[in-house]
Amino acid sequence: MKGEKKIVKSEVQNNANIMLSFLSRITDSIEDLMKKNATEMEVITAKYNGLLLPLIEEKDDLEKGLISLMKKNKIVLFDATDVVNLPHGSLIRNKEDKVSIPKTALAECKAQGFKDVIKTVESLDRDKIEKWPDARLVLIGAERKPKEEFKYTVKAKGE
């Protein structure tokens, strides 16, 4: 055992305590900076929301107006084409058949046996399986394994 140094519990605890001290200070610094960031972001967001929201509303109104103009004047605009190129952009009309599905369709599909169009989402309840005895876990190919976790807590300011 030549060259081996005996590990002293108090030294290990002292080193761990020093590391916890650093973690505590860094955690406090992070929290302080996050609070300052959030406060400043609220101010900036409020400033720009005041400028952005009216523009977004105006854009939405213009888009609705443009769509309405295209619908009302589709014969004039789209007489021989589905795309009208203008200096500031293009007007586009897509024409396709869409299926409208009534609210009663799911029940009808079940009654008719059309299972290929019915989505089913299945998943396991991990919490219930965790409570099973080992003999039952084996039946599904699962097993209980020991797990070791290491965690730490740091004291908050003023504790």
Image (cartoon, rainbow, N blue to C red):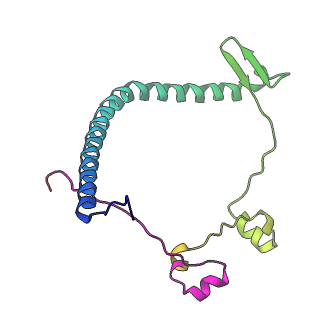
Task: Report the front residue among 106 and 122.
Answer: 122
Magenta run includes residue 19: no
For the question of whether residue 95 can be seen, the reply is: yes
- Count all numbered tags in the image, as a single digit: 0
In the image, farthest residue toward the front = 2
Predominant secondary structure, magenta span = loop
Residue stretch rendered in magenta on the structure: 130-157
- Where is residue 110 drawn, in percent x and y? 75, 72
Q: Identify which residue is drawn at 23% across, 57% down.
A: 14
For the question of whether residue 154 can be seen, the reply is: no
Taking the image as shown, residue 64 lies to the left or right of residue 76, namely: left
In the image, farthest residue toward the left = 158
Location of the N terminus by quadrant is bottom left
Task: Report the front residue among 109 and 39.
Answer: 39
In the image, farthest residue toward the top = 87
Taking the image as shown, residue 32 lies to the left or right of residue 145, namely: left
- Where is residue 34 drawn, in percent x and y? 31, 40
In the image, farthest residue toward the right = 80
- Where is residue 31 drawn, in percent x and y? 28, 44
Magenta run includes residue 140: yes
Vertical arrangement, residue 69 with respect to residue 156, above or below: above
Task: Report the front residue among 42 and 32.
Answer: 32
Q: Identify which residue is drawn at 28% across, 44% down.
A: 26
Q: For residue 101, which quarter of the picture?
A: bottom right
Taking the image as shown, residue 61 lies to the left or right of residue 97, namely: left
Vertical arrangement, residue 1 with respect to residue 52, above or below: below
Taking the image as shown, residue 63 lies to the left or right of residue 14, namely: right
Location of the C terminus by quadrant is bottom left
Task: Report the front residue among 90 and 19.
Answer: 19
- Where is residue 135 drawn, in percent x and y? 60, 88
Vertical arrangement, residue 48 with respect to residue 132, above or below: above
